[in-house]
């Protein structure tokens, strides 16, 4: 047998100990700490590529929040799923209280119910994962200006910035934390910790862990990819009635897996110059002005190519017609 606890490879599994992110967790906890003492605190915007521990670290902190204080609660919301203002507010109400409306409520009624549910707390930490996917970013303003309970919003995103109305941005004004891709050694540590609990002793060796870690590292330091490769290899080896996972099995799984590589070192010439110029965000007009020797069509083709590589994302500018701002997917 290979797999001992396969559920430990599930994406929503939160280990008791987080490898390679001690500093980031301390920063998140340090931000929440004033709230535990009835003091005002900063909001956070955490950004970085997929699979680098953003959601894991925040859910780990939320998991332990009740041990810090019974008067501060935490709510996690995936904005891929809950995209609208009512959906986000209802999700908070459902998470904190027992509420099942028999009819649709007006905006004022929703806010009244939310304030009622939160009245027994002096603070709430609201995590908006994929915050850039929210259709109604006014909900950020609602939470920070209309809710009577002190609120900290922790926004998570793969983007290093996104468009937001100035009024909402003024209310949010987050402190930024960047999560960089894991190193090979960090991914090895993550895999070893998970393998000890999820796989039977003797069913894997250091070479297998090293190869899975290298695959994750080459995918942008993505530990999620490395864990997926290890889990799939374990299932494949068990299906074949092997005594342990071997390198050939890992290589076979790798060849069957679609891997995304985001590495600016792969870019050359004008493509790399445009990518580097984008920095924290540039409009299409700013990019064209920076490279006047190149036709607009060539620049648009390069921007399209970078988008297809999932290295940049374009965001339509509010009230600007058919104009866009390009930001890096970090």
Image (cartoon, rainbow, N blue to C red):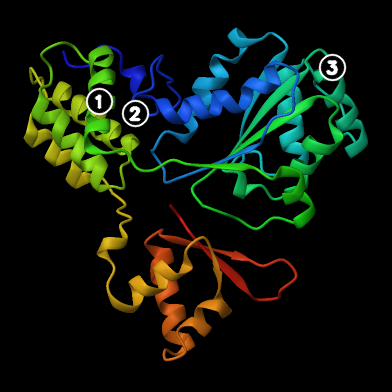
Q: Quadrant of residue 250?
A: top left
| Residue count near mark 3 (Cα–Cα under 10 Å), binned few <14, some 14–19, many ≥20 | some
Q: CA distance from mark 3 to mark 2?
A: 37 Å
Q: CA distance from mark 1 to mark 3?
A: 42 Å
Image location (x, y in percent) of residue 275: 40, 68
Q: Is residue 303 above or below residue 299?
A: above
Residue tagged 2: 20
The residue lying toward the viewer, choosing from 84 and 112, is 112
Q: Nearer the viewer, mark 3 or mark 2?
A: 2
**Earlier sequence position, callout 3 versus callout 2:** 2
> Disc 1 on helix, strand or loop?
helix
* Residue shown at 22% from the left, 15% from the top: 199
* Residue shown at 51% from the left, 52% from the top: 159
Residue tagged 1: 189
Q: Is residue 146 above or below residue 173?
A: above
The residue lying toward the viewer, choosing from 240 and 172, is 172
């Amino acid at each position: 047998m290979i797999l001992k606890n396969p559920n430990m490879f599930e994406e929503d599994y939160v280990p008791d100990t987080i490898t390679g992110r001690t500093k980031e967790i301390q920063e998140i906890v340090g931000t929440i700490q004033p709230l535990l003492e009835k003091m005002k605190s900063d909001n956070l915007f955490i950004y970085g590529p997929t699979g680098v521990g953003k959601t894991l670290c925040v859910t780990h902190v939320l998991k332990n929040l009740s041990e810090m204080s019974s008067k501060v609660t935490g709510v996690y919301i995936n904005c891929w799923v809950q995209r609208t203002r009512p959906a986000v507010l209802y999700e908070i109400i459902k998470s904190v209280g027992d509420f099942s409306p028999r009819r649709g409520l007006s905006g004022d009624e929703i806010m009244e119910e939310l304030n009622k549910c939160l009245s027994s707390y002096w603070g709430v930490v609201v995590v908006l994962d994929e915050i850039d996917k929210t259709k109604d970013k006014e909900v950020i303003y609602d939470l920070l200006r209309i809710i009577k309970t002190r609120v900290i919003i922790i926004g998570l995103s793969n983007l290093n910035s996104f468009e937001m109305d100035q009024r909402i941005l003024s209310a949010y004004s987050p402190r930024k934390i960047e999560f960089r891709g894991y190193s090979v050694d960090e991914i090895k540590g993550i895999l070893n910790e998970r393998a000890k609990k999820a796989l039977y002793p003797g069913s894997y060796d250091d070479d297998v862990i090293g190869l899975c870690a290298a695959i994750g590292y080459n995918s942008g330091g993505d530990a999620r990819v490395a864990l997926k490769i290890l889990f799939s290899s374990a299932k494949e080896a068990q299906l074949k009635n092997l005594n342990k996972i071997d390198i050939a099995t890992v290589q076979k799984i790798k060849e069957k897996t679609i891997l995304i590589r985001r590495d600016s070192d792969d870019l050359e010439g004008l493509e790399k110059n445009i990518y580097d110029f984008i920095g924290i965000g540039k409009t299409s007009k700013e990019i064209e002005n920076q490279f006047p020797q190149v036709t607009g069509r060539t620049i648009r083709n390069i921007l399209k190519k970078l988008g297809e590589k999932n290295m940049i994302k374009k965001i339509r500018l509010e009230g600007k017609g058919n104009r866009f701002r390009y930001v890096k997917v970090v």
